[in-house]
Image (cartoon, coloured by chain):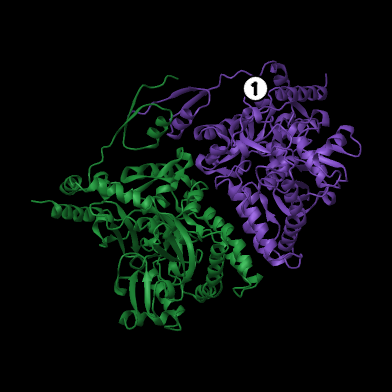
Chain colours: A green, B purple
Amino acid sequence: MSTPAAVVNVGADLFAEAVEDQAVPVTRVDWRPPMEGTEADLAAVAADPLRRTANERALAAMLDVTATLVDVAPASEVLGLQRGEFLHAGPPIAWERTSGPLRGALMGGAALEGLVDDPEAAVPLFESGTGVSLEPCHHRSAVGPMAGVVTPSMWMFVLEDQATGRRTYCSLNEGLGKVLRYGAYAPEVLTRLRWMGDVLGPLLRAAVRSRIDGGAGPVDVTGILTQMLQMGDEAHNRNRAGTLMLLRDLSPAMVLCSEEAGFDGADVAEALRFIGGNDHFFLNLAMPACKLALDAARGIEGSTMVVAMARNGTDFGIQVAGTGDEWFTGPAQLADGLFLGDYGPDDANPDIGDSAITETAGIGGFAMATAPAIVRFVGGSVPDALATTRRMHEITLGENPRWSVPVLEFQGTPTGIDVSKVCRTGILPQINTGMAGKVAGVGQVGAGLVTPPAEIFPQALSRLAALAAARTPS
Amino acid sequence: MSTPAAVVNVGADLFAEAVEDQAVPVTRVDWRPPMEGTEADLAAVAADPLRRTANERALAAMLDVTATLVDVAPASEVLGLQRGEFLHAGPPIAWERTSGPLRGALMGGAALEGLVDDPEAAVPLFESGTGVSLEPCHHRSAVGPMAGVVTPSMWMFVLEDQATGRRTYCSLNEGLGKVLRYGAYAPEVLTRLRWMGDVLGPLLRAAVRSRIDGGAGPVDVTGILTQMLQMGDEAHNRNRAGTLMLLRDLSPAMVLCSEEAGFDGADVAEALRFIGGNDHFFLNLAMPACKLALDAARGIEGSTMVVAMARNGTDFGIQVAGTGDEWFTGPAQLADGLFLGDYGPDDANPDIGDSAITETAGIGGFAMATAPAIVRFVGGSVPDALATTRRMHEITLGENPRWSVPVLEFQGTPTGIDVSKVCRTGILPQINTGMAGKVAGVGQVGAGLVTPPAEIFPQALSRLAALAAARTPS
């Protein structure tokens, strides 16, 4: 066939990409209008003399972080969490506005802490607010998947940026189905959590410390993320290879340290089986690794880069490098996806969890091209998965050279969501997510694809524009 | 842009595929001539009334096999290998014609067995042939990577097809670099092999048996292959995910059985580290799993399906379902690829090893589309890797529905190489491979891409034609 000299392509689609792959010159024509009403703010932010450098600094700071697993310890110890204090996913929320799965997780957490005997008895406690308080994980350098409830007795992964000593935290992953983070609180949920507190947490602590004491060093979480992105994981809803690499890195130390830590072979074997049987176990390391990277970009004046996306099951909130700790929130959306068993769309709660920190850092939904098998879990098609990663490059500041996508010829994942680019293109960040049942106690009902509510980006842009204006001498 | 109504495309290339992905009708025009001199044999084989059904049976028999790991045991025990008997990769060969890496491995094997103290002293032994004999692994239901040397004291994985009880065997993988299978025989090579015989083999045997006795059953090797093909492995030169899944499946049993088997925590930890530190460990399970499947198709009269491709470092041989145990051989080729350290093309031995059994079964080079990161190990480009899997569909009888490639929208891997199709299209099977140093003792020098010598396919076709003619009443 004859090779066309040039092709004009409107919008981003796979055909354009395919033609580019054949080295035919392609002119992209982007016809998308900016989000309604954002023109003036876009112009103001574009004119901010700090913006370009601030964004370069924000992106560089984030890419510079390497996360290592340095300890495993109870939340009471490392977060200073007191009896009656509950952390949760997403932006701040009061009990009255909480969704079913967050309520269910809080009720189960209250029972786990012995505040009540029966999770159902916790409702009046939270209604009265006596002796209990709610606070976002993000406000304590932590992240929690789904409901993200953390109580003082829960054991946390402790991640550290070796260059700065900064730390982030996340609970241990319970598995899928009927688990606390999806709002389930049946007796078996609490039994599992107690075993995690009595055996899994202490054994992992002993193993992590034994690795460090023995000279093998802390587990290189960023390194595992790099590898797993070449092994079909996108590190949000596929964490299979990551989980297996964690097991590889910890199992020798688990064997060697178990006796001294007071555990026998049966405990070690059960812990190995539990981790190996839970493909999502590594998610709870991927998330704090992403937060550790993004936190390095917080508080950079003039930067339009998103540093957190998080949902509490009612509200979806973002925080931006240039706007401090302020949350810009809107209603959490319903995911579109695949359902477990007989569950359907009517059973699902709106989007919930801090796990969108993965997309914020350029993996998860942003890296679906490297994990096409995920469409069997969250829905969509393989071409969609490839197109999604390509599309996310349109709203990000750069690429992460460490996290490369082999099938896209080792291009780095799209990294650093730019509020300006989102508003200018109308392209929303693509998140893939588990779906919790909307009724407290149910647990997981499916998994799917979702975006933030569009309006939070113009909100953030407006604040950025106001801050830029305030800085400009009149 | 306007959508073209139709595109005519000559030959197979990525652009055609990309256009097809956009649902534009494509007419493929294959201009490739048949291999020279094969026209009459192609016609004779095409007219063989047994051919179609025989190939359907061969493919179905192969796809029907599931491989499980049922035991680990010394070759003396499970292969009846006696002192002085050496197995090797590829078709039969006498010492005089052996290449450097096969010589090196035989010399090291002789020292391992105590036939000589120093590997160098083994040369006269093999030259005289007194008390030593060489035989292909394939003749004992076994396969061996690279030199493929097996001696009586080496421990073997024992794989079984649960439906029929048929078994195949493969040694334990030593890792990369200076290892016996690449022709190295330095003291550290033999020390490692002795540890594998004293600790690793017996510990794995105890774990495999303990799983079976405990009700967890044998390790599902075919199931791991299915998963790893969705995790960036093609199961020839990438076996990372496969190795980690094996570790996941065996580590709890290794912990639980170790004391009874006479090993302590340090032994278990060392074994876990050894396996976890060797991304190629699972190759030695992938290979016998492929042989187990392909052996089911041996001896089917009229079938033109290849049931083995194997190289001894001098000759490349194939066996075909319809031609019994006959080898069709030609000179092994030099691979084109990437070299370790300062090594270059002049240091490499021609193609060696039974590991092309993976390509024969539809994985390895045939599944490179699912493992694009492999181009960093064997060379080539990502589009090449995708195109290779597509191209192999042109010379295969079908697809393996169990082994699907997510990025090709879950298409099964191209499976069952058809001698007729190879001769008719001139497309040679694509193999990816490690490269051994051509001098005995050196070890691995690189990895790359290679094909069989073209002439062995017309040889096999000619025999198939003769057999068909002999069956036809004149």
Measured as percent of width and height from the top left, residue B60 is found at 69, 40
Question: Which image quadrant for residue A30?
Answer: top left
Total marks placed: 1
Measured as percent of width and height from the top left, residue B127 is found at 86, 32
Question: Which image quadrant for residue A43?
Answer: top left
Q: Quadrant of the N terminus of chain B?
A: top left
Q: Is residue B160 visible?
A: no
**Residue A338 drawn above or below residue B108:** below
**Residue B127 drawn above or below residue A312:** above
Residue closest to the far right: B130
Q: Which residue is mark 1?
A: B424
Q: Nearer the viewer, residue A53 or A428?
A: A53
Left or right placement of residue B2 versus residue B22 in this view:
left
Q: Residue at x 55, y 48 (%)?
A: B231
Left or right placement of residue A444 versus residue B447 in this view:
left
Q: Nearer the viewer, residue B327 or B117?
A: B117
For disc 1, the chain is B
Q: Residue at x 40, y 63 (%)?
A: A167
Q: Quadrant of the C terminus of chain B?
A: top right
- Three-letter amino acid code of the residue under disc 1: Arg
Question: Which image quadrant for residue A358?
Answer: bottom left
Measured as percent of width and height from the top left, residue A81 is found at 39, 75
Q: Is residue A142 visible?
A: yes
Q: Nearer the viewer, residue A454 or B137?
A: B137
Left or right placement of residue A307 versus residue A413 in this view:
left
Q: Secondary structure at mark 1?
A: helix
